[in-house]
Image (tube, rainbow, N blue to C red):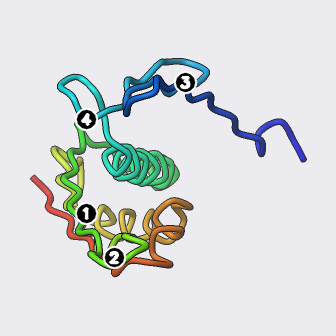
Amino acid sequence: MTKMDKKEVTLKFTNEFEGDLVVPNAVVKIGSEAGTVAPYDMLLGALGSCLYSTFLDIMKKKRIEFERLEMVITGEKRTEVPTTLKWVNVEAMVYGPEKENGVSESFRLATEYCSIYRTIAHVADMSFEVRIL
């Protein structure tokens, strides 16, 4: 296993649902109070981060410049246990691409290559839409 394959985080909790996710470059407060993140917030955030990183790599390879990207990720959990995600929709808004040709295809490819998207797809119906603004 190479160094890049191994990932490690540390979680530190009190005897309530409050704690810290300690990663190499940051600490994230976990909980249900203001200023903290809950487990599915982190999961959807991880999905968005992975998709964006993958999309960015593809756009750079295609040499397509753009100003910025915003995503809204929505999902619904099942009511039956285990309460995995039932569905997830990713709405990506790509602002100011130098050319529109190739942007939507690049995002589609990102959904194929993003490991977190593929992992969640094992339990949830996945969909996405791309808007070019």
Instruction: Identify whether 37 is placed above or below 41.
Output: above
* C-beta proximity under 8 Å, tags 2 and 4: no
Q: Decide which of 3, 26 is in the foreground and name it.
A: 26
Seen as rendered, the residue at the extreme front is 15
At 51% across and 60% down in the image, what residue appears? Answer: 114
Residue bearing the label numbered 3: 12
At 21% across and 65% down in the image, what residue appears? Answer: 130
Q: Amino acid at mark 3?
A: Lys
* C-beta proximity under 8 Å, tags 2 and 1: yes
Residue bearing the label numbered 4: 32
Residue bearing the label numbered 2: 126
Crowding near pointer 3: few (<14 within 10 Å), some, many (20+)? Answer: few
Q: Amino acid at mark 4?
A: Ser
Distance of label 2 from label 3 (alpha carbons): 32 Å
Crowding near pointer 2: few (<14 within 10 Å), some, many (20+)? Answer: some
Crowding near pointer 1: few (<14 within 10 Å), some, many (20+)? Answer: many
Crowding near pointer 4: few (<14 within 10 Å), some, many (20+)? Answer: few
Q: Secondary structure at mark 2?
A: strand
- The x and y percentages for residue 49 are 41, 44
Distance of label 3 from label 1 (alpha carbons): 31 Å
Distance of label 2 from label 1 (alpha carbons): 8 Å
Q: Secondary structure at mark 3?
A: strand
Q: Decide which of 75, 78 is in the foreground and name it.
A: 78
